[in-house]
Image (tube, rainbow, N blue to C red):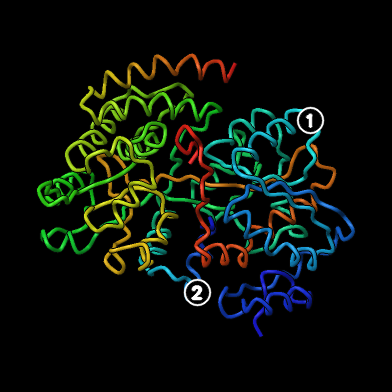
Amino acid sequence: MTSSFFTPTRRSFLAGSAALGAAGLIGSRPASAAVDWKRFAGTTLEVNLVKSPRGETILKYISEFEALTGIKVNAEATPEQQQRQKTTIELSSGRPSFDVVHLSYHVQKRQFEKGGWLADLSGYFKDPSLTDPSLVEGDFAEAALKFAKDADGKLRTLPFSVDYWIVYWNKELFEKKGLKYPTTFDEMVTAAEALTDKSEGTYGFVARGLKNANTPVWTSFMLGYGATPIDASGKLATTSEGAVEAAKLYQRLMSKSAPVGVSGFNWAEAQSAFLQGKIGMWFDGVGFAPPIEDPQKSRVVGKVGYGVMPAGPKAQAAATTGDGIGVTAASKNKEAAYLFCQWAISHEMGARLLQAGAGRAVPSVDPRGRKGT
Amino acid sequence: MPFRQSILEDAKVREGVKMPAAWVDAVVASGKISQLALPVIIPVTEFRDIYGVGLTNMIGGADPAKELETATAQFEPVLARSEG
């Protein structure tokens, strides 16, 4: 019998996993003999989560954590915008009602760090009595570690869920034109324009055009020009050569090769257009993929390639957004809370997240256009 | 989508993924070249709002350099206030 990420002596945990039919599907990891998961038995933790497929995956399996550790968990999951308001108010008061908090890196990281709201997890991460040996920095993408650490290199969260920006491409349309998947920005432009035939209603490219939602498209292109909106000295660099070149690329793709009305498209409209089979390439987060292979929703089932971002003139980079989970600086139960965070990003839980296709939150509907997505 | 590469590369885990293998492959490959998509600042929403208007204008034919100059002039004081 293979063992779990967690100690195999916890029969109740394994029984719970078996009941889920998980043993064969979610994979297995070497056992951790060093971590005493029962060390904080009897503790009660308050956990604040975002109501999303990711947060709900945690909620669904919390009883396993409780059985494993003897820790009682009171978890609350609220919609994204409400959760952000609540956590900001409570954390800024210095007396949050929760020990564990779920945050959006690309929206809240700086705010949390400036406020000093998160505990330093660096010591716990290095402590073999608290951290499973499989949990190492080398298991995370570079962006994950940048997200998780503060400016001083202290670990403030554990990276929970990621969304990389990729290019979805319609292989059938590419084949008709004798084209291959682009490996550079120049090739992407060439392919987009070759694929566009407005008389047939076929377009080479689609991405977000709606204000606010469209900004990550541009900043993603910037990475290929070796540019970022804030430079190494912390100054705004949004008129740099790279920023302007990225904007020109955005303009060219979106004005010459995108469907009519694209300036009003958020991710949902772009996705919908791509699913109709008349778009060559769609650039957005990888977590939006599942409907593509659903015959009830898609005309491109089995016809789509999933492409890594082509290289720009100076770099090839996959733009990354994500969520983390951390322990509040005010928590009286930091080590127990750290165990919870570690469990939430464990091999088993990550496998469930991946297999459920729960990598992407269903954004709350913001009247101004689904902000924060 | 989990951040940990060992999960994404675990053959047993991948057996249970309903999406095509190419999708997971794209995730794994992207992880190796990952960079932050947005600046790590407090006024992210304002950043997206202000530059987003310029980008939408560009689709309609506005000059990219001028739009970025305008947006930057609007956003600089917002950023300064947030860090003050």
| Residue A293, quarter of picture | bottom left
Identify residue type, mark 2. Gly
Identify residue type, mark 1. Gly
Distance from Cα at disc 2 to Cα at disc 1: 43 Å
Tell me the residue that label 2 is attached to: B16
A91 shown above or below B21:
above
Q: Chain of mark 1?
A: A
Q: Chain of mark 2?
A: B
Residue for point 12% across, 46% down: A198
Whether discs 2 and 1 lie on one chain: the answer is no
Between B6 and A162, the one lying in front of the other is A162
Q: Position of residue A91 (x, y in %)?
A: 73, 33
Tell me the residue that label 1 is attached to: A94
Q: Is disc 2 placed on a helix, strand or loop?
A: loop
Between B24 and A355, the one lying in front of the other is A355
A6 shown above or below A117:
below
A169 shown above or below A18:
above
Which residue is farthest bottom? A1
Category of crowding for the residue at label 2, using alpha-carbon neighbours closer than 10 angstroms: few (below 14), some (14–19), many (at least 20): some
